[in-house]
Image: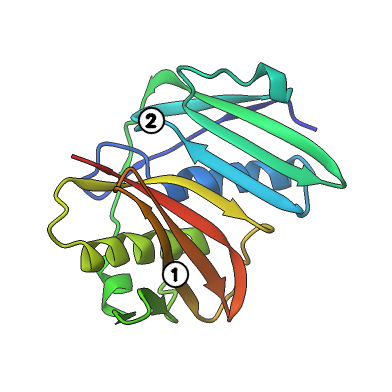
Amino acid sequence: MKSDFHSRFAFKGERDYVQGPDIHDAVTAFLRECGVENVERFDLAVHKVIRTQLSGIFVEKTEMPVENLGVGVGYHSGGTEHHLLLTENGEAITGRVPYREELLVQAMSFDAATQAIRCSSKSGFSAMETITSLNKRLMQLLFPDSGGKWFFARVQLKRFLPADFGEIEVILKGNLNFQLTRSLIKIDDADAGFIFFSLVR
């Protein structure tokens, strides 16, 4: 198994930070390169706004710091728990790529009564990009006067997300005074996990 992780992120659109789904997709691709075909549980938490490249190492759970943590990843594979610690390494992100999120937004269907939003059009986006965009739009529609900016905080999944999928639905399940919201992820009508957002004012 590889011992370290080094990101090669590019900023999306006009953003000056790395999106949560880009971190998720890079980490899961890295784990697959390490020989991890699938997981029984996957947990990725972003503890700060990431503005430079990331480096990461596998650590024991007791070695995970409580302060200055960039991104923490935990997963179960083959009945064993593993942890990956990612921190900003100071390397500037120099690349920038277009990101037409409006294509996803146009394909979304919102249900205020059930506090749910869904999308069945991939339009070249990954599952995690779709989930994150859905949840951001859901927060904007449910809480239009909240102010501030919504950030990806955490995702907890039952297994790796599929490359191919039909409909993805995101349903709000909890809101801790905007410090943390919790939404259920459903992929093709099956529960896939939860995504958490935080509002920064």
Residue at 54% x, 72% y is 186
Pick the quarter of the image with the N terminus: top right
**Mark 1, residues whose alpha carbon is within 10 Å: few (<14), some, or many (≥20)?**
many
Left/right placement of residue 129 relative to residue 193 reads: left
Residue at 14% x, 50% y is 147
Circle 2 is placed at which residue position?
A: 48
Question: Where in the figure is residue 129, as x and y percent of width and height?
Answer: 43, 59
Q: CA distance from mark 1 to mark 2?
A: 24 Å
Pick the quarter of the image with the C terminus: top left
Answer above or below: position of 67 versus 46. Answer: above
Mark closest to the chain's N terminus, 1 or 2? 2
Left/right placement of residue 112 relative to residue 193 reads: left
Secondary structure type for disc 1: strand
Answer above or below: position of 111 versus 80. Answer: below
Residue at 22% x, 68% y is 141
Amino acid type at circle 2 is Lys
Secondary structure type for disc 2: loop
Is 54 or 93 nearer to us in this picture?
54
Is 33 or 144 nearer to us in this picture?
144
Give me the disc on residue 98. Answer: none
Question: Where in the figure is residue 19, as x and y percent of width and height?
Answer: 38, 45
Question: Where in the figure is residue 54, as x and y percent of width and height?
Answer: 48, 27
Amino acid type at circle 1 is Val
Image quadrant in which you'd find residue 72: top right
Circle 1 is placed at which residue position?
A: 170
Question: Where in the figure is residue 35, as x and y percent of width and height?
Answer: 80, 44
Image quadrant in which you'd find residue 140: bottom left
